[in-house]
Image (tube, rainbow, N blue to C red):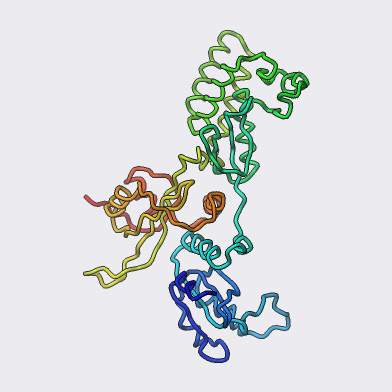
Amino acid sequence: MKPMDEELFENSLCIESSEWTKDTLMGLPVCKGVLLFTNADGRPIQLLQAASLRRTAQAKLLGSEEESDTPSRKTDISELTARIYYTCCYNNFQSQITYIRLAHAVFGKQAADWIQLPSPVFSVLDTNTKLPYFTVSSNPKTSETRNVFGLFPNRKAAALFCETLNTVFGLCRNPSLVGTGNEPSCPYLQMQTCPGPCVGKLAMETYRAFIEEALAVAGGDIDTALEERKQQMQTAAKSMHYERAKTLKDQIDALEKLKWSTFKWTTRLEQLAVLHIDKADKIKVEGQRKLVQQYAVWKITANGVFALGQCSLDNSESLEALLREKWDTQNSESYAANSYEHLATLSLFLFRNNVQGFWGGLPDATALYEQLAKTFQITPTQSA
């Protein structure tokens, strides 16, 4: 480890004798954070996230105080470790992005061996193809023609999203046949569940109109498409066009699925904006004897993490002022190697069952403050 790397961490603790002891490790704080164990040459041994820096270091270097006949499967690093570098964090999200940043800084090209994240997938429609359609992709790159939607909890949800839009709007579901001359053999065409643009049964202008409507729905405008189809279904039923009414009913049922909580965070990637608030450190406030709990506020988009600052939640006024002043900030924290890793990190929290802190959009100030009071179990005190 090079001397300059010491600046990556808040502080460090060096061994004071021939071996680590409980008294030696008392120099470590008990807060959440990230630890790096290094040898006498400054080479990294192990990087860890810790719920308590001191307790984790004790467990790694001192082991269990109770004797056991069962051999431990953990690697003993106590004899190798000469120094412990550490950085305090105050919540899980801060700890995670700090860990990823340090993994890249410390291990370089080997950082991927130290970072375990989910593999996010996206729904993509490229209008530059001959017959554009929605497909599942692991590439989040957007462009003028490449429309990308996310996030999804898993590949199954992304596939359902694509299949629903392709089916409801009559988009191609068998692209492998396009341009091969075997288009008439497509089972969807034979079952008459496809309008047949590949064989000239549907004008491309009409197909392009279907695409625009599908893109609007994919971006979140589901209610408009639902209302239109409900009215069309009623008209078809009154005119005794029952087959048409049944088709529209099936489309309505399919579109309703896109309103499931599964797709809570699904939108155009460039429009994704998540507000995250969680506990930070406690600070001394003039005129108050007790330390005052602070809360860290982040805006997270597909482009990165934006730290907006900290405030107390004694009342809604300080939070409103912070959001009003900082929400449009353009300075993001550099921690991930690329956008895919960043979106994987965000997915790790958005789709976790027992996620800590507040995760949501940006509702009006009163509703937000009430949600925060419930999340953090504080008594809301609205300012006049």
Relative to 20, residue 330 above or below: above
Q: Residue furthest top?
A: 239
Q: Position of residue 107 (x, y in %)?
A: 58, 66
Q: Position of residue 338 (x, y in %)?
A: 54, 52
Of residue 219 and residue 258, the one placed in the foreground of this image is 219
Q: Residue at x 64, y 37 (%)?
A: 159
Q: Residue furthest bottom?
A: 17
Q: Residue at x 49, y 63 (%)?
A: 98
Q: Position of residue 290 (x, y in %)?
A: 29, 71
Quarter of the picture holding the N terminus: bottom right
Is residue 53 left or right of 171 when viewed as pictured? left
Of residue 194 and residue 316, the one placed in the foreground of this image is 194
Q: Residue at x 71, y 25 (%)?
A: 178
Is residue 38 left or right of 288 when viewed as pictured? right
Relative to 252, residue 59 above or below: below
Q: Position of residue 229 (x, y in %)?
A: 54, 20
Relative to 275, residue 51 above or below: below
Relative to 90, residue 347 above or below: above
Q: How many marks?
A: 0
